[in-house]
Image (cartoon, helix red, strand yellow):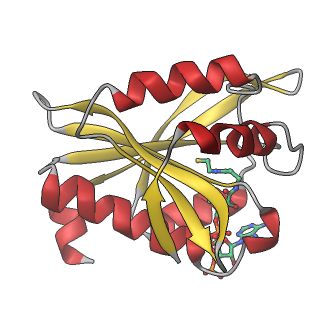
């Protein structure tokens, strides 16, 4: 598994993944349109500290990952991860990507707190977060519409001293 910087040329793949019902079963409907993906891309690229990569496996682009919402004052940030080619799920790639993002967030950006949210029912994602040392800290009740249903978001985080114990 390798990474490279996400570029404008990757946005069509990104939009394709965000329109795949298997991939988005537990995701919001953001970035279904090319314009939404471009707006997201430009916003993130405006901050040089943001880690925004595509994931390469077998020479193929299979997904993307980002360290977002960097708050330097409070030393916290959010992680996002989508493996858009679902054939590659369950092979440990998610864990490798997540650990690389944590290394960047804690060792390079010197964050104190790293957080991620996942929809209730996204058991694979929850399992992954727990495997990487995150703990659940709360629930945002019915805060997002997935499909046509209001859905809970489960809030997970890991603090710097917890990361050092891994
Ligand atoms: C969530 C996602 C990143 C996981 O990536 P992945 O490469 O499959 O993750 P890993 O293989 O490292 O780990 C997945 C874990 O979930 C487990 N798992 C698989 N299916 C599961 C299920 N239905 N219920 C619970 N756990 C499950 C796997 O066994 C594995 O745990 P293990 O290593 O202890 O056996 C990937 O499925 C994905 O991109 N999904 C779509 C987008 C998404 O939901 N992103 C997360 C939003 S927060």
Q: Position of residue 131 (x, y in %)?
A: 49, 72
Q: What residue is shown at x 47% (from left), y 74% (from top)?
A: 96
Judged left or right of residue 132, residue 63 is: right
| Residue 18 in sight in this render | yes
Image height of 129 relative to 28, above or below: below
Q: Nearer the viewer, residue 139 or 82?
A: 82
Residue 144 appears in the figure = no
Instruction: Please provide percent x and percent y for residue 17.
Output: 77, 45
Give the residue drawn at x 79%, y 50%.
23
- Which residue is at the front of the view, 116 or 66? 66
The residue at the point 56 percent across, 52 percent down is 64
The vertical placement of 96 against 31, above or below, is: below
Q: Residue at x 61, y 42 (%)?
A: 9
> Regarding ligand 1, which quadrant of the image does it lie in?
bottom right
Give how far across and how far down residue 32 sits, in percent: 76, 27
- Compared across the picture, whether 6 is left or right of 10 comes to left
Q: Nearer the viewer, residue 141 or 62?
A: 62
- Quarter of the figure with residue 61: bottom right
Check the picture and name the quadrant holding the C terminus: bottom left
To which quarter of the image does residue 20 belong?
top right
Q: From what the image shows, is residue 2 above or below residue 38?
A: below
């Amino acid at each position: 598994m390798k990474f490279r910087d996400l570029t404008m040329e990757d946005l069509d793949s990104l939009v394709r993944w965000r329109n795949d019902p298997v991939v988005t079963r537990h995701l919001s409907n953001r970035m279904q349109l090319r314009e939404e993906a471009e707006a997201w891309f430009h916003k993130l690229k405006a901050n040089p500290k943001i880690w925004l990569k595509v994931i390469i496996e077998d020479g193929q682009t299979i997904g993307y990952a980002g360290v977002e919402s960097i708050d330097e004052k409070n030393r916290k940030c959010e992680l996002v991860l989508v493996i858009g080619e679902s054939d590659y799920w369950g092979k440990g790639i998610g864990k490798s990507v997540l650990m690389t993002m944590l290394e960047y967030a804690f060792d390079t950006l010197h964050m104190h707190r790293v957080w991620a949210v996942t929809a209730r029912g996204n058991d694979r994602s929850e399992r992954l977060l727990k495997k990487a040392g995150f703990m659940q800290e709360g629930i945002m009740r019915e805060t997002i519409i997935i499909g046509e249903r209001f859905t809970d978001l489960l809030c997970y985080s890991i603090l710097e001293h917890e990361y050092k114990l891994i």
